[in-house]
Image (tube, coloured by chain):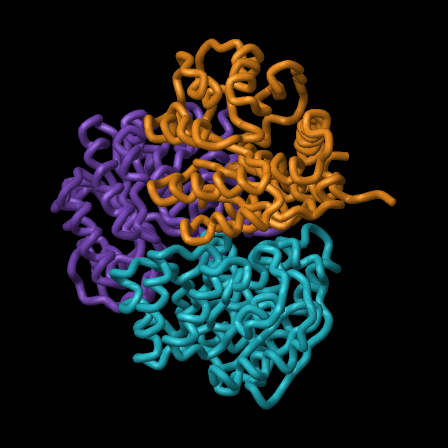
Chain colours: A cyan, B purple, C orange
Amino acid sequence: MSLQKINEKKPLIHCITNYVVANFTANGLLTIGASPVMADAFEEVAEMTRIANALLLNIGTLNDRTVQSMLAAGKSANEHQVPIVLDPVGAGATAFRSQTTHTLLQQLKITLIRCNIGELAAIAGANWQAKGVDSGSGELDVVQTAKMIAKKYNCLVIVTGKEDVLTDGQQVEIIAGGHERITKITGSGCLLSAICAALLASSNEPFEDLAALLREYKQISLNAYASMGTFHENFFNQLEQFAEVRV
Amino acid sequence: MSLQKINEKKPLIHCITNYVVANFTANGLLTIGASPVMADAFEEVAEMTRIANALLLNIGTLNDRTVQSMLAAGKSANEHQVPIVLDPVGAGATAFRSQTTHTLLQQLKITLIRCNIGELAAIAGANWQAKGVDSGSGELDVVQTAKMIAKKYNCLVIVTGKEDVLTDGQQVEIIAGGHERITKITGSGCLLSAICAALLASSNEPFEDLAALLREYKQISLNAYASMGTFHENFFNQLEQFAEVRV
Amino acid sequence: MSLQKINEKKPLIHCITNYVVANFTANGLLTIGASPVMADAFEEVAEMTRIANALLLNIGTLNDRTVQSMLAAGKSANEHQVPIVLDPVGAGATAFRSQTTHTLLQQLKITLIRCNIGELAAIAGANWQAKGVDSGSGELDVVQTAKMIAKKYNCLVIVTGKEDVLTDGQQVEIIAGGHERITKITGSGCLLSAICAALLASSNEPFEDLAALLREYKQISLNAYASMGTFHENFFNQLEQFAEVRV
């Protein structure tokens, strides 16, 4: 249902993302009918964001150049009412990632933060042991922390894991299910963030539609695992099928 | 036939291309027997181009650093009679892309421009609504515009879409067919540009061989769609089969 | 057996690698139970390496910025006893790559060099005709040269090709077999380097375990070729199966 909304709207998504998942993200967005455009040059990002329907900021392979581009694109997005999804990949793993995440949250109006538990902990300043860009380990009340961050930054927050948590600071949706095999595809979380951006560009009920999207994404991983053939390709086939608009 | 020529020659293709499609392009070139080398550091591009059989310049994720590298590589290519294919990804979407495209066309002798309709419109300065790196929408006499650009820059022009147009400014070939499913694989146009570079390095009759290549590429997408399994993998299998040299 | 050791240890591998193979490398490491983290910003690499179990330095798409990051990460690795694998992609093809390789070997204590014959020749200063990032052609006593380089830099050396050579400067293992179809997947050598890094983080007998890994990798390519379906996906399936820990 949520993927179908994207397929009907066919939004243009400006992605400033990491080079590990850029191809996977572009193919994932194309598969569901969205149009990805990757552009990270300071000279052009503000202009590109202006014509886009949503902006994705993913710090997975950030550097000093692209951080400046993210800020410039974000300011353009805010100016032109383009929704922003922030994927703070690896926040907590290094000071550079934590500080960049805080800078983006301070200087921009973010619509949605999509992160894992370790990144949530880093944003909240909680005690946590990061493991690179994986979620790491520690003790955290995910729901309460997510609500607190959502209130603080006046945004939506999605924390994915075995159970996904979605909150706007008041309402909370918890979505269980899915197949863990998806954690062996690099960028499955990054792609989800990109799809969330596409959905924000296509929805009039973001909270309800994001909750539905999280359920669809979990179902897709189950279906991909259950299908004949390879998980990776099945995953794309399922994405495409879920995005098909029945008339 | 054209893919077989590449497979027999096994040319080395220096690609300065975007990080979204670099992996797909490298695998595509390897599949047909060409050797890709991706190198975009200013310190080395002139030297790398000198030992290559063709140079691909693709501005998909350009930045100030790589634009300088493209110019340096291009000048080395011109000096050493290495053919250049320009793929002006997203020209028209931002001023930076349009200006870079013009700079490359002004300062280098380009052998072939491979673009979509929106990028052609941008090069020609025509009125057009770009949509990121997609072709966008508008009214344009593609054949006449392509001929005009080919004459202006004394180069070959390929404009791909539902119908592909190939021209050297005088002759025109129009190739229809193919399956639109290929538009859901990111970089299918970028890979075609890279394959065109490989063909220019392997052909004594560029116009005729490029026309044949465009027909083969369309047939490959039809075959990939008709095969069992996933389109993406079938696409590579078909590429490989078409490149096989029958003895 | 070696892949199983990685799967049991689940090491975190900090990869500074090229954008052509970053996705493939990340997926390959995830497939065998390792955790990849790609980070190349000077501001964070020393910190990221400190928490990693091994560091991979791959110069496939090096530039002035990332060379500085490689040096900073390498120094942090040496300081914190984190093993380093160097993959000198394209050494010999340009002066920049040859010089960078020498700088890394001079300034850092490298644990393992994983290269092809052309790159070995470049490190040794031997006469050789490079072909981009392919091995090229020439005459070289691979075993003697590899032993000499291993002694000179007090490191392990793996030279892959039709026959792989592994040496610590004294002992030599030569591993034949495998299927050449793997040479049509870009980054199959780069991924092997990353897996070697993961193994160095997981093994108490590096020489024996690296030899076993080279045999497993060759067997995986044979199995992938013999399986129904596509080589590329079979390759990942085989990787996963070999990494499965039998209890």
**Residue B228, image x and y in percent?**
64, 49
Residue at x 47%, y 59% (from the top left corner): A26
In the image, is residue B156 above or below residue A221?
above
Marker count (numbered): 0
The answer to whether residue C241 is seen in the rendering is yes
In the image, is residue A70 above or below residue B177?
below
**Residue B143, image x and y in percent?**
22, 53
Residue at x 19%, y 67% (from the top left corner): B127
Q: Nearer the viewer, residue C184 or A145?
A: A145
**Furthest residue toward right:** C247
**On the image, which quarter does residue C4 sit in?**
top right
**On the image, which quarter does residue C32 sit in?**
top right
Q: Nearer the viewer, residue C142 or C167?
A: C167
**Residue B118, image x and y in percent?**
27, 60
Q: Nearer the viewer, residue B202 or A217?
A: A217
Left or right: residue C157 versus residue C17 is right
The answer to whether residue B227 is seen in the rendering is no
Left or right: residue B63 versus residue B223 is left
Residue at x 60%, y 16% (from the top left corner): C169
Q: Quadrant of the N terminus of chain B?
A: top left
Q: Nearer the viewer, residue B203 or B132?
A: B132
**Furthest residue toward bottom:** A170
In the image, is residue B53 above or below residue A194?
above
**Residue B235, image x and y in percent?**
52, 45
